Image (cartoon, rainbow, N blue to C red):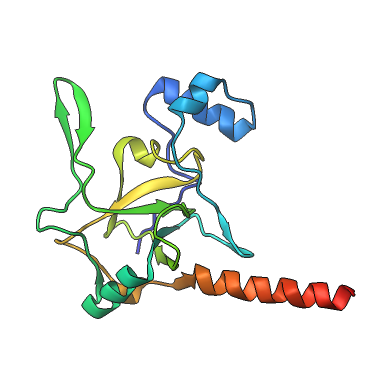
Amino acid sequence: MELYNSNTMPLSNDPIFREIQEKVIKGEPLTIVEKVKNGRDHPVKELYGYQLKPDHCYRAISAELFEIYKKQGFIYGYGSDDEYQEYVENGKVFNNNKGVDWYLGGVSLKYGNYDKIVIECPADKAYFTPAFDNGCRLSADPTVRHLKSSGMKNPIPITMLTNVFDIKKIQEQQAELNKEDKLKMR
């Protein structure tokens, strides 16, 4: 199994966007214009003490969708033509934005809903492909990349998942621990 790794993937092919990524990596401040151009999502690379792996993909979904995945046995998309493709038109590269969305090396917790589940899967090149521009355009963190998996033709088997995080349950456990700590301090 050959895996993608967010720490070794090339930066953006666009020189302007690559310059923004290099500033982020160096910890340099961005101008307002650069902040607007940088990715819209701010993924996390740790979940309640668990360090997310740079060679694994993560997807935040609802508990309901996770139950559907378990029942089907695969991480499916929504249509028979739900496959990610890049194409060139008049010398410019475009994509159809189809396929199943994942983050490599991190997860954006704004997806899913109140009963959020985060799934983890090795970033096997047989199942994943970087989205537009090396997966650089969606994440504000250049070490977290946007990858796509096949919606229908080559869906990821549920057996490939290495971790499942029930965020609501973790938050409830954390709140209980915090309550116990406060009681101990009295």
Q: Is residue 92 above or below residue 146?
A: above
Query: Does residue 142 sit above or below 155 in this rendering?
Result: above
The C terminus lies in quadrant: bottom right
Q: Residue furthest left?
A: 80
Between 21 and 29, the one nearer to me in the picture: 29
Quarter of image, res 113? bottom left
- Judge from the rendering whether residue 33 lies leftward or rightward of residue 77; answer left or right: right
- Residue shown at 41% from the left, 52% from the top: 103
**Residue 45 position within the rendered picture, expressed as x and y whole percent measured from the top left:** 55, 54
The image quadrant of residue 63 is: bottom left
Q: Which quadrant of the view contains residue 68?
A: bottom left
Picture mark count: 0
Name the one closer to the observer, 76 or 9.
Answer: 76
Q: Residue furthest right?
A: 186
- Residue 141 lies, in percent from the top left, at 51, 40
Q: Residue at x 10, y 53 (%)?
A: 81
Q: Position of residue 127 (x, y in %)?
A: 27, 59
Residue at 25%, 79% in the rendered image: 71
Residue toward you, 62 or 125:
62
Q: Nearer the viewer, residue 118 or 160?
A: 118
- Quadrant for the N terminus in the image: bottom left
